Each structure stands twice: as C-alpha cells, then as structure tokens.
C-alpha cells in the first residue's frame, strides 16, 4: 500500500484519468473529492462489498 501525505486542496492522480482531492479535514475525518470517468465506478468500500455479495448470491441462485 502506498501511503501519501496531502493537505487540504491537494490532489493525487491515479493513472491519467482519476484525481482524488482532499476537500476538508476535521478531526479524524477526511473528505475526498473524486474525479473519474463515468466508465469507472466509484463506491465507498462498504457499498462495494455489498454489491459484490449481491453478485455472488445472484450467481449462486442461477446455478
């Protein structure tokens, strides 16, 4: 895992298409802004995990 230090209004780039900007820092919470092409889904981890579980359950029911 790459760990970077950034301050408010600073960004990192992932490839040529995804930019992550630090929008706000309050206590132990950080707000991120993510600019990515519409073809790249962006989800919070817990939402992504739920989507993956639903996909796995759907495949199990089809068999």
Image (tube, helix red, strand yellow):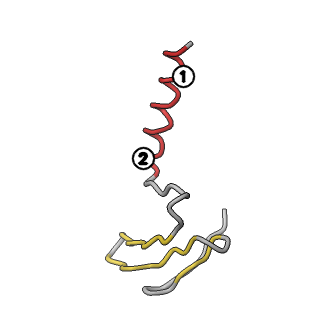
Label 2 SS: helix
Q: Are marks 2 and 1 in contact (CB under 8 Å)?
A: no
Foreground pick, 12 / 41: 41
The quadrant of the rendering that contains the C terminus is top right
Mark pair 2, 1: CA separation: 20 Å
Label 1 crowd (10 A; few <14 / some 14-19 / many >=20):
few
Q: Which mark is residue 25?
A: none
User: Which residue in the structure is indicated by mark 1?
Assistant: 59
Q: Determine whether 5 is above or below 35 in the image.
A: below
Residue lying at the far left in this picture: please name it.
26
Furthest-top residue in this view? 63
Task: Report whether 41 appears left or right of 14.
Answer: left
Classify 10 Å Cα crowding around label 2: few (below 14), some (14-19), many (20 and above). few
**x and y, in percent, of residue 46 in the image:** 42, 46
Q: Position of residue 27 (x, y in %)?
A: 33, 75
How many numbered marks are there?
Answer: 2
- Of labels 2 and 1, earlier in sequence is 2
- Quadrant of the image occupied by residue 59: top right
* Residue name at image x 37 percent, y 78 percent: 25
Residue holding disc 2: 46
Looking at the picture, how far across and down is residue 56, in whole percent? Answer: 53, 27
Q: Residue at x 50, y 61 (%)?
A: 38
Which label sits in the foreground, 2 or 1?
1
- Residue 8's image quarter? bottom left
Rendered view: 20 above or below 40: below
Residue positioned 43% across, 54% down in the render: 44
Q: Give the structural element (helix, strand or loop) at label 1.
A: helix
**Residue in front for this viewpoint, 60 or 22:** 60
Residue 26 placement (x, y as % from top left): 32, 77
The image shows residue 28, relative to residue 55, as above or below, that is below
| Position of the N terminus by quadrant | bottom right
């Amino acid at each position: 895992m790459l760990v970077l230090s950034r301050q408010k209004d600073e960004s990192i780039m992932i490839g040529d298409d995804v930019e992550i900007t630090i929008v706000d820092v309050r206590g132990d919470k950080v707000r991120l802004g993510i600019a990515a092409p519409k073809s790249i889904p962006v989800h919070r981890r817990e939402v992504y995990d739920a989507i993956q579980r639903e996909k796995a359950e759907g495949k199990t029911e089809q068999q």
